[in-house]
Image: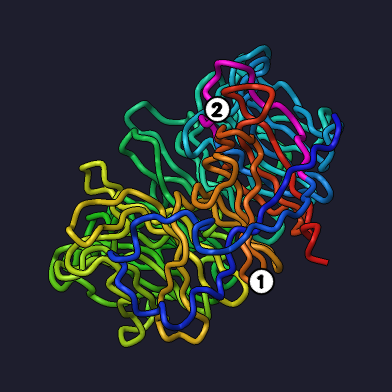
Amino acid sequence: MAMRTINVYVIAILTAFTSAHTAFSAEKFMPAIPLLLLGETPAIYKCKATLLADLNGPGNTPYAKRANFTDLGNLTLFFADHSETGSELWVTNGTPGGTHIVKNINPGSEDAIHTSTLSKEIVRVGDKVYFLADDGEEHGEELWITDGTTSGTNMVLDINVGVGDSWINNLTEFNGKLYFLVGNDGQSGSQDRRRGLWVSEGTSATTRVIAANPPTVGTWSGSEPGGTMVVLNHRLIFEGSSHDEGYELWQSDGTTGGTSLLKNINPGNADSKLQQFTVVGSKLYFMADDGTHGMEVWVSDGSSPGTHMVKDINPGPDDGAVMINIDKAFKKNPGFNNKLYFIGSTPAEGAELWITDGTNGGTQLVRDIVPGSGSPFYNGTGSPRLTFPAGEVFNGKFYFTSLRQQFEDGSPYEDEALWRVNEDGSTTIQCFTGGWVNYLTANDNYLFYKTSQGSVQGASRELAIMDKAGRIRVLDILPGGAQSWPKYLHMRNDQSLLFVTNNSRHAPGVGLYQVECPIEGDQ
């Protein structure tokens, strides 16, 4: 496949947004003005973008599956849904010839990778990658391992023997081994499906349960476990349950004897509703309900005394924490200046951007972006769901997107706008562009994101690139008004950008593209 060159256009110089703009009203700014109308004349650069593979045939749904890119040496593994093979594990070395399916695990066009969120987990441990797959024959969805080759891709162990799924989730690397939670090991009745903490070193002989219910960890509800697990200060911290305490915060050193309850946040056997574990530095932030204060932000250093509510943002039993983070890419780098940004909610300000350093005094509202009880993160569909679409740290600043703004008359303006929090900690926010911005991804030199604002030649949702000088460029991948819809942006070994989009050969269809860095024209 030949290299395809795509024109890139400089569409704005961000120095146009000087300090004079730092105090403007969010509502007044929100009517979307294409950046090409800001007085900047686009300069044309050349940027090498390679179509690595057609991932979908005509007529298939192009955005059904996440890619979940994972680097392994000079290879990048990912999930792709192809019309001939179904959803399977793929690999690329950054060239068209080196981009292909690894193994058709579920023969024919049936999916080996299920559509559920839990099934999308993939993690690197040493020189191997673990993922979940269903061979469609003798086994259900189980743990698999790969080195990026066909022969090196195999099932580790049929934990729930037979065609039933093991409900595996939270694949986590810890001390050179893989740890994970199992929802059903097949050793108990249908009314007693268990979640246990397991470990694996890549073989059936080294894959075993560390702690299972009863009496330590698990669920007897019979429903698929959500759970969450992270590494904090050389310990595994995860959501576990017992008959006496319910779902609570647990810890493990990777051994059976070293696995125990960390803190019973909601006393008795009531659940604390743990959500969104997020590690920033040496602290773990999460959302929990202690039965008195509603859902609030909590912090832990891995000890029981060091685990406490950060602040009762919405005093009383009502929820004050809405969301710590939801975007997968943001979870790789959620902190900024060793602080956490999250969405907090009060009756007076609504759901807005907050910041915390883990102390009561250091937890505060960044800015009431939509004055009053409105929210810039409301999804506008009539439901109370809120969304923190994306966040990323780039060039010493924190960038994030909001989902809903308002005009001065209060009428909704549905869009995703790109915002910036300054480095000096002054909590100043600058909104410098709108246009359905999402999928923020950065390396040391560029911030990449999807946008429709300022697109050229009639094109709509395209890939935008910002450099350290503040120049924004848009790649018009499908000229003439067609939308490329770039999604699942991933920095491949910090040297090139991979993303999934519509391509010129299929409409609708999905193509895997690569943009090489540095961008030509910057030298």
Query: Residue at label 1?
Result: 468
**Spot occupied by residue 111 in the image (x, y as percentages of width and height):** 59, 21
Q: Is residue 83 above or below residue 298?
A: above
Q: Say which quarter of the image contains residue 511.
A: top right
Q: Quadrant of the C terminus?
A: bottom right
Query: Residue at label 2?
Result: 62
Seen in the image, is 362 located left or right of residue 166? left
Q: Residue at x 72, y 32 (%)?
A: 90
Q: Amino acid at mark 1?
A: Lys
Q: Residues within 10 Å of mark 2 (few under 14, many from 20)?
A: many
Seen in the image, is 291 located left or right of residue 466? left
Seen in the image, is 522 located left or right of residue 282? right
Q: Is residue 203 above or below residue 238?
A: above
Q: Main secondary structure of the magenta part?
A: loop
Q: Residue at x 22, y 69 (%)?
A: 371
Q: Secondary structure at mark 2?
A: loop
Specify whether residue 71 is in view: yes
Q: Which residues are magenta?
A: 49-65
**Spot occupied by residue 464 in the image (x, y as percentages of width and height):** 60, 53
Label whose residue precedes the other's in the sequence (1 or 2): 2
